[in-house]
Image: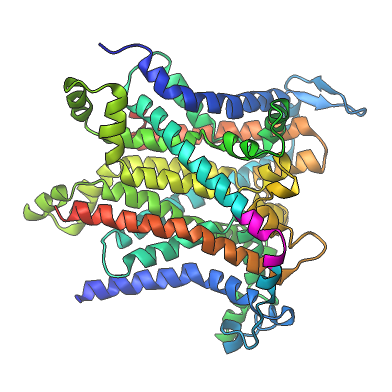
Amino acid sequence: MRRGGVARYAAMIALAVLALLPLYWLLISSIRPAGDIFRYGGRFSWYTLIPGRLTFENYAELTRGDFPLAIGNSVLVSVVTVVAALLINSMAGFAFAVFRFPGRATLFILVLASFMMPFESIVMPLYTLIRFLGWTDSYQALILPEVASGLSIFLFSQFFAAVPRELYEAGRIDGASWWQVYWRLVLPLSGPTIATAALMQFIQQWDAFFWPIVAASSPDKVMIQVAIARHANMETANWGGLFASASVSVMVAALPFLALQRYYVRTMMHSGGK
Amino acid sequence: MRAKWVPFAFLAPALLGLFLFRAVPILLALGGGFTGTGLTGETSFQGFDNYTSLASDPEFWNSVRVTLVFNLIINPLQVVLAFLLALLMAKPGRGVGALRTAVLLPITVSIALTSVMWNLLLDPAVGPVNGLLRSFGLAAQPFFHSQGQALPSLIAICTWRGVGYWMFFMLGGLSAIPPEVNEAASIDGAGPWRRLWHITLPLMRRSFGFVLIADTAANFLLFAPVYIITAGGPDGSTSLLMFEAYRAAFTLLDNGRSLAISTVILLIVAAVATLELRFFRADDVA
């Protein structure tokens, strides 16, 4: 390996360690007995990094409660949201990037403004609407308000606007409908953008906390962050349970990242190999 | 031969969703900023009263100042770091995928949990970060418990969580640059710095525009760490506007004032985002 290559790997590994150390602390704290969690923090020793005594009771406890249900609910809500969101937001992004139509600038500004208002301030009107529709405590209450996303439309429109216009025109001259241009020509070129938008909306739903509490508080609709947060409140904290559930949450959420990583590497090697 | 309805057919599903679940609630919230709640709990129209009362409130102005300082530092910092990280990690190689995933992982910890975790890690007494400092013979730091260190600590933990995520968007932008462009410049004798300045950066303007605007919106709307760790303190040093809006609604029980602060946040984000769009000329979409 060249010297530059060694330096590059050293930098990447150092940054990865910096990112992972707090998560490692989360993980080892989750397998320490309750009395040991904060014991080695203030005075640094090997035991700060390596647990002396181990317990998996926190994890056993998780399997006995509603935590598996919470993971299932969050996976379901996140996946359905991402699939529906990719379709409708990429369509809207395509329209903003490709067409010139009356009201376009105004609509685009409204799309941007939609993610600039604090969610907390629209929660009550949104809840009133969901109740009016009869959707309280339902999956659609958790999913539908998060599908259309101004940020995702913005992302897609930026990418589609960078695609050379000749490509669209060529498709049209060949007799393709606009739908075929979008579906057969443009989407297959948009791999990394689709991956990024998917990731963005997955994280949005995986981290959802406030809205699930308001809109779907029944036990059978419990979402993962709500289940995690129940281990701690203002008075008491079950740190072991909190850290164990948080560690599981990170590991499950890492799976789509790993999947998308492979996809990213492939597209980049493909373009690099030309 | 373009049918007039075609663009609207592509827009309809997403815009219907945004209209119902964002535009309508936002309009109601904006309207709520012009109302007040009486002693008996009834809501009445108050005109600009909430805004005039905010304008003469030094705590509100302190919060505006803290919010602007916070954003003026954190947004450029995260965008630049994300770009440098993406440059470092763009080239494929053995283990690069795993290393990229490692720096992305912090975003999978929710912002509330990030706050709880870092509050413990940076604790003056039992926190391992101070334990490490002490083991090097350095003085323990107060972090969130000091007026001078609270805001920088807030910036640090949000950057820990966010920068790998924003790197992902930058990687997408870098992967869209045709390699021939760089190869051609290389053959013409352009060194790495010139290629970065004259080829990569101009071609990355859309990615920069997107990341900066998305990051700006996320950071102006940041709430959980202030609520969980500092409650705006010490001495108002982390009193972000989002926390003031929360305090107005839940401590002062003044919903009109809370919604007025939310409206101020929306206006500031919109103004800043407009400047950012112009700066990166990413607005040719609009």
Residue B231 image offset from top left, x and y in percent: 73, 54
Helix, strand or loop for the magenta stretch, by majority = helix
Examine the rendered structure and indicate whether residue B20 appears above or below residue B231.
above
Residue B204 image offset from top left, x and y in percent: 30, 45
What residue sits 40% from the left and 47% below the top?
A196
- Residue A236 left/right relative to A203: right
Examine the structure image and report whether residue A65 is included in the region drawn in magenta. Answer: yes
Return the residue found at the far left: B188
Residue A174 image offset from top left, x and y in percent: 16, 23
In which image quadrant can residue B46 be found? top right
Examine the rendered structure and indicate whether residue B141 appears above or below residue B153.
below
Examine the rendered structure and indicate whether residue B130 appears above or below residue A175.
below
Examine the structure image and report whether residue B249 is included in the region drawn in magenta. Answer: no
Examine the rendered structure and indicate whether residue A11 appears above or below residue A252.
below
Considering depth in this image, is A229 or B55 the residue closer to the camera? A229
In which image quadrant can residue B147 be found? bottom right
Which part of the image, by quadrant, shows the C terminus of chain B? top left
The span shown in magenta is: A62-71
Residue A121 image offset from top left, x and y in percent: 68, 35
In this rendering, does residue A40 appear at all? yes
- Residue B194 left/right relative to A77: left
In this rendering, does residue B72 appear at all? no
What residue sits 52% from the left and 41% below the top?
A81
How many numbered circles does the render carry? 0
What residue sits 64% from the left and 64% below the top?
A245
Return the residue found at the far right: B40
Considering depth in this image, is A170 or B135 the residue closer to the camera? A170
- Residue A237 left/right relative to A43: right
